[in-house]
Amino acid sequence: MFSRSKSPNPDVTPVGETPDEVTEQPAPGKGRATPKRKDAQAANKRPLVPNDRKAARQAAREKDRKARDLAMAAMQNPTDQKLARHLPPRDQGQVKAYVREHVDARWNLGEFFLPVAIVMLLGSFLASQMAELTIVLFVGMYGFLFLTIIDAVVMWRGLKKRLLAKFGEVPGGTMMYAVSRSYQIRRSRLPRPVHKKHGNFPS
């Protein structure tokens, strides 16, 4: 008689409808149905291995080849600013460029060590029957090596002062970078020397 209508319980699923069907009803203001959890998870899955492995390997090789070509072009043309970012990590930066230019401008005894060592070794083989001459050649080779070490120390001390004056610091590994370059034959150095002749020290 005095009955009143009961408000529907929001937690009760209407008869004839499953929970999944209820979630598919469009929410006010969205304009689209809420996707099921299993559908959303399936959409986010990505294959760990590409379907065509052969094509993926070919693409990776092609990418590596292009990177090597760009790195070689940058080492052949170290003054090209567009290619500078393609230099190997050990050769990048203003400090490394300054070190290379300083070492290349200098006459280093180390750059003559390899030719001198080859000549002395050949001479020792040719004079293998002459023990005294062989000893003299070996002593001479090690004596020249000792002189190259002294020259490298002198080179580094002067270069270190210049680096501190220009950049305010000397990054780690710079000494070995400079010394190893000073022992390379000038024409075979990579990145290539900026100047063809010695004597052009960086400012």
Image (spheres, rainbow, N blue to C red):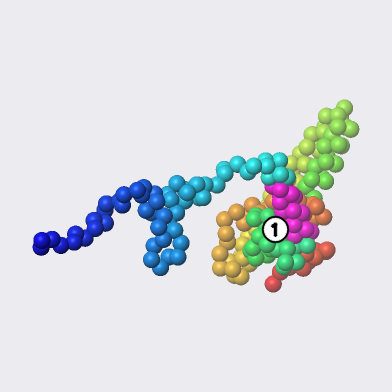
Residue labelled with disc 1 = 87
Task: Report the magenta stretch's main SS.
Answer: helix
Place of residue 52 in the rendered image (x, y in percent of width and height, measured from the top left): 68, 42
* Left or right position of 95 against 115: left
Instruction: Decide: few, some or many residues near mark 1? Use Cα within 10 Å; few <14, some 14-19, many ≥20.
Output: many
The residue drawn where x is 65% and y is 55% is 90
Place of residue 97 in the rendered image (x, y in percent of width and height, measured from the top left): 69, 63
Residue 147 visible = no
The residue drawn where x is 82% and y is 37% is 121
The residue drawn where x is 21% and y is 60% is 7
Label 1 secondary element: loop
- Magenta residues (range): 59-76
Residues 23 and 88: in front is: 23
Residue 149, compared with residue 2, is above or below; it is above
Tell me the amino acid under the disc marked 1. Answer: Leu
Q: Residue furthest front?
A: 1
Q: Residue furthest right?
A: 126
